Amino acid sequence: EVQLVESGGDLVQPGGSLRLSCVVSGFTFRSYSMNWVRQAPGKGLEWVSYISSTIATTYYADSVKGRFTISRDNAKNSLFLQMNSLRAEDTAVYYCARGPRGYSYEAFDYWGHGALVTVSS
Amino acid sequence: NFMLTQPHSVSGSPGGTVTISCTRSSGRIADYYVQWSQQRPGSAPTTLFYGDKQRPSGVPTRFSASIDTSSNSASLTISGLTTEDEADYYCQSYDNGHPFVIFGGGTRLTVL
């Protein structure tokens, strides 16, 4: 069974940093691209970042470029999102999502349950 | 950049059928894969279709997806409605430029 489990969500002050993790199981992690998607309270979905299976390629939404860094450890079946210079508008539930075989950022087939990040003083 | 426009809400009766549209503002809808996801209240999204019509295992066949090039839109049709179908539905597509992935604003389905 494919599982994606996020952790690391917390309350953080504006300007602070936080690192989210997504540990996966049930599939060969190193063979799949991965994404982060977020959802502000009461709002729709917003794509945040993408990383290829080989780690060679990363992409970011304009809203987080230069502040967030996506990475992965294929040996530990783990995806990460390092978030720096956090703003109130970064408050959201953050989901990790897997890209199906043969796709890059065009599609997601499995999603995690989400981790809540709250940026507030 | 482009936008994906969905109706804010739709409703249907138990056993009935509804269709949710997703209109792309620029760029040909058929040139870029469309994905549909379901998000029940208080839950994470789940994928109904990716790559236009690829259905993950476990998605019932009463869900179907299509593309209409004349209106530059995609559609999700749900037949045999049940109260379990009450959820938000999101379409998603992408651009080879930036910001790569765009979601529609979501459509709230109510089964009355």
Image (tube, coloured by chain):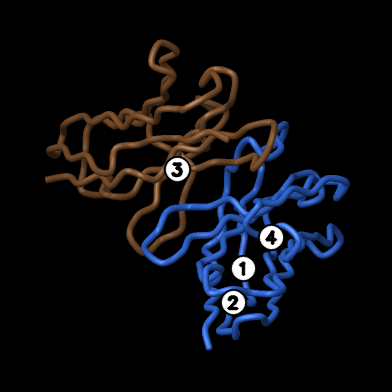
The percent position of residue A92, horizontal first and vertical second, equals 51, 67
Determine which of the numbered discs, if any, sits on residue A9 in the image. Answer: 2
Chain rendered brown: B
Q: Mark 3 vs mark 4: same chain? A: no
Taking depth in this image into account, of B38 and B33 the one nearest to the observer is B33
Q: Residue furthest top?
A: B70
> How dense is the environment of label 3, judged by Cα within 10 Å: few (below 14), some, or many (20 and up)?
many
Q: Mark 2 vs mark 3: same chain? A: no
Q: Is residue A74 left or right of residue B92?
A: right
| Residues at discs 1 and 4 in contact (Cβ within 8 Å) | no
Residue with the mark numbered 1: A6
Picture colour for chain A: blue
> How dense is the environment of label 2, judged by Cα within 10 Å: few (below 14), some, or many (20 and up)?
some
How many labels were placed on the picture? 4
Is any atom of residue A30 visible in this view? yes
Give how far apart the Cα atoms at labels 4 and 2 are: 17 Å
| Residues at discs 2 and 1 in contact (Cβ within 8 Å) | yes
Is any atom of residue A27 visible in this view? no
The percent position of residue B27, horizontal first and vertical second, equals 55, 22
Residue with the mark numbered 3: B37
Residue with the mark numbered 4: A24
Q: Amino acid at mark 3?
A: Ser
Q: Tell me which corner region of the image, top left, top right, bottom left or bottom right, holds residue B81.
A: top left
Assign a secondary structure to mark 2.
Answer: loop
